[in-house]
Image: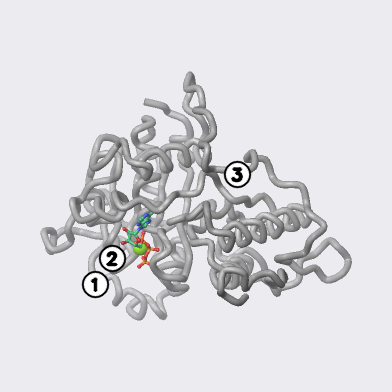
Amino acid sequence: MTTEGRNTPRRIAFMNQKGGVGKTTTTVNLAAACARRGTPTLVVDLDPQAHASLHLGVDPADRMDDASVYDVLLNPDDPETIREAIVEADENLFVLPSETDLAAAEFELGDQPGRNTRLRSALQSVRGRFGAVLIDCPPSLGLLTLNGLAAAGEVIIPMQAHFLALQGVGKLLETIRLLTTGERAINPDLTVTGVILCMHDHQAAHTREVVEDLEAFFAEAAELPGLPWSSARVLRPAVRRNIKLAECPSFGQTIFEYAPEANGAKDYAALAETVFGRPAGVISPEPRADDSSPPPEPATPEPEQSVSATTDGSGEDPVPEVRVVVSHNTRTQDGRGA
Ligand SMILES: Nc1ncnc2c1ncn2[C@@H]1O[C@H](COP(=O)(O)OP(=O)(O)OP(=O)(O)O)[C@@H](O)[C@H]1O
Ligand SMILES: [Mg+2]
C-alpha cells in the first residue's frame, strides 16, 4: 500500500453539466483503478440519482436509516456523521453514498451560511484516511456541484467528443473561472486537470476534429498562465465505447470485478496511470494501435484558431468570457453542422 499523499489527498471533482456523458462511469472506475494500485480511495456521490453508490454495490434503499452525504451536508462540523456515512465497497475503495433526499439539500441549504463549502469542511476530518477523493457531481451547476468544486483541488471533465459538447465545456470553464477569481471566489486554488473522452469512437472524422479543436484550445490556454485550465489537456487514452462498462453498474460492480479483460478495464487502468502516475516498478504497455493520441505533454500551440480562449488584448489577463468557437468549414462532412 502506498502512503503517497495520504495527508493531502488528491481531490478530484468529475463535472459536466451535460447529462449522460460518462461522469459516474469515470469516477467509479478510475477510483477502482486507483484503489487497486494500493491507494485508499473515497468516492463521494453528490448526485441524488445515487448512480455511483449503486455502481459500487451500495443501494440507498437498503440503508434508509443510515447516514449519507445528505446528512454530511447538513452536519458538516460533526466528524461522527461523515465517519458513519462512509461505506467500504471493496479493498481500499470507499463510498460516501447518496440518497434521493439529497435533491432537497439544494433548497434546504439555500440560505445557510457557508452553504457551498460544507462538503469541504466535512472532508477535513477524514482526509488522513485517503490518498484520493473522487467526487461524482450531478449534471447541473447547482449547490451540490458547487460543494463538489469547493471541496476539490482539481476538476476533470468527462465528455463525449461532439461539437455541441465543446460549447458546454466553454460554459463549464467559465463557471470554474468565476469560482476561482474575485471577491466571491469559493476555491481560488482550483485547477482543471483536463478532459476525459468517454464512449469514444476513434474512427469517426467528426470526433477526431472535435479532439483537435480541444487540443488547440488547451494549447492556447497554456500560453495564458493564471487561468485555472492553463495546464489542462486531453487525458489519454480515450475511453472506448464498451458494452461491459454499461452492464457492470446493474451488478453493483466496477469494470475490474465484472469484466477485467474488457477494453473498458484496459482503458480505465491506463487512464489511472495518466491521472495518478505510474506505480513504482510498472512498465507502461505499448501504445494501442487504435489510439493515435499524442504524447501526454502539453501540446505546442497550433496556428489554427479552431477553439479560442479570449484575452483582453494585453496577452496577460484573461477576460471573463470563455469563447468556444468551432471554425472549420468542413464540419458538415459527416452530415452534422457546427
Ligand atoms: N465507455 C462507455 N461505453 C459504453 N457505455 C458507457 C460508457 N461510459 C458510460 N456508458 C454508459 O452511458 C450511460 C451514461 O454514463 P454515466 O452514467 O457515467 O454518465 P453521467 O455523466 O454520470 O450521467 P448523469 O449526467 O446522468 O449523471 C450509462 O448507461 C453508462 O453505463
Ligand atoms: Mg452520473
- Labelled disc at residue 293: 3
Left or right for 249, reference 289: left
- Mark 3 lies on a secondary structure that is loop
Q: Ligand 1 closer than 8 Å to the CB at disc 3? A: no
**x and y, in percent, of residue 300 in the image:** 76, 47
Residue of label 2: 70
Q: Residue at x 59, y 43 (%)?
A: 292
Above or below 112: residue 260: above
Judge left or right: residue 224 versus residue 253: right
**Pointer 1 with pointer 2, Cβ within 8 A:** yes
Give neighbour class at mark 2: few <14, some 14-19, many 20+ (Cα, 10 Å).
Answer: many
Image-quadrant location for residue 179: bottom right
* Residue 173 x/y as whole percent: 60, 66
Q: Residues within 10 Å of mark 1 (few under 14, many from 20)?
A: some
Residue 101 image label: 1
- How far apart are the two marked residues, 3 and 1, measured between alpha carbons? 42 Å
How far separated are the C-alphas under marks 2 and 3? 40 Å
Q: How far apart are labels 1 and 2 at the CA level?
A: 7 Å
The residue under the point 35% across, 36% down is 35
Work out whether residue 126 can be spotted. Answer: no
Q: Is residue 13 above or below residue 262?
A: below
Using the image, determine if residue 175 lies above or below residue 301. Answer: below
Which of the two discs, 2 and 3, sits closer to the camera? 3
Viewer-nearest of labels 3 and 1?
A: 3
Residue type at mark 2 is Tyr
Image colouring: one colour
Task: Check disc 3: other Cα within 10 Å, few if <14, some if 14-19, many if 20+.
Answer: some
The kind of secondary structure element at disc 2 is helix
